[in-house]
Image (cartoon, helix red, strand yellow):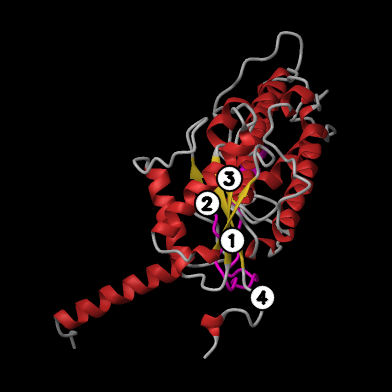
Amino acid sequence: MNSPPPTDRDAIFARRALFISTAIAGLACTGKSSSSHGNEAKDPSGGVAQIERGGGDEGQTPPPGPEGPTTHTPWAEVMAEAPSLDVPAEGLSSRERALLELHAKTANRDYDKLRELWETVPACGADEDDCAVWAELIAGLEPYYDDVAPGGCDSASGVTGTVAARRAAHARFRGGLIRQLEHHFNESAMHYGTASAASWRQALAEARAPKPMPCLSPCPLPTFRDIVEVVPFAQDSAALDETEAAVKLNLDDVLQQARASAGATIVIRGHADPSEANPGPLAKQRAEAVRTWLVEAGVDADMVEVQGLGAELTIERGEAGLEQNPRVDFDLIPPKPGKDKSAQP
């Protein structure tokens, strides 16, 4: 007997079934991550930042060096351009200090590993079975392509705009080093012939392949949401420019979080670049300008404190610092147990 023709109701159920099955497939945790995840890398301290995969040489054959595998700029000169890792002796909460010190420790450990790669000059071809140096290079690079960073829930509490910005700055810097290393080893492999170059490119492509993603994070949700927004300022200025989208949007976000954080204390912290005139007073004036804006917008004045850190807690060095360092960030201090009146019945 022939089946009856499908009804509109059958068609609707069929479309729903297709939609649900597609959604479930997209949420699968054990498969490979999508291409968009391929460009993300976790900071060992817990932050997330963009790292480009590859250095633009994939699929191309770089010319061999005239006298052998190429060498790099001396490592000391490279690290002179690295973002700051300094942690001031005073003025920070214990929670933030712990995060900054942890980030400095893990970042320096990463740089020590990258230095070993930076100073490696292969003495044999990547296609030679008894040449182990290329496998060691892949083993050194591969962790930086891994979307799944080792655990730790330290980011659940105490993250400030400075902590987040430092993580992002060092992730960008490491990404640039990795791209240079890829180019360097492409050239070194080509020096030993096209077969060597092809073998290296294949191994590098396998190392870059996206890794499986975890389903759930084991980290507990924080009671209070950290304020990671940063309010930027123009060089040598303490004036809030609300015509700048980054200023207005971040101020509005901070205002909403302040309203949702009854009982907490918000420490408004001003920062400056070392090249600015009078960085100490200027940083304090920036913090006062933001405090005035928040209080006028309805935040309880007793809820906010002002702190000027001068140029003691910078993000970048040189010209990049002139854009990143003049800023105000926030440290949210949760209330002590039993002190949040809004939480009482």
Q: Are marks 4 and 3 in contact (CB under 8 Å)?
A: no
Q: Is residue 64 above or below residue 93?
A: above
User: What residue did someone put label 3 on?
Assistant: 270
- At x 80%, y 44%, the residue is 109
- Circle 1 residue: 213
Residue that label 2 marks: 37
| Left or right: 233 as drawn, with respect to 164 | left
Q: Secondary structure at mark 1?
A: loop
Q: From the image, state whether disc 3 or disc 2 is nearer to you.
A: 3
Of residues 217 and 319, the one nearer the viewer is 319
Identify residue type, mark 2. Answer: His
Please report contact status of discs 3 and 2: CB closer than 8 Å, yes or no: no
**What secondary structure is found at the residue carrying circle 3?**
strand
Q: Residue at x 72, y 25 (%)?
A: 78
| Picture coordinates of residue 285, whole percent (x, y) | 54, 42
Q: Earlier in the sequence, mark 4 or mark 1?
A: 1
Residue 35 position within the rendered picture, expressed as x and y whole percent measured from the top left: 49, 49
Residue behind mark 4 = 336
**Marks 4 and 2 in Cβ contact (< 8 Å):** no
Q: Nearer the viewer, residue 52 or 167?
A: 167
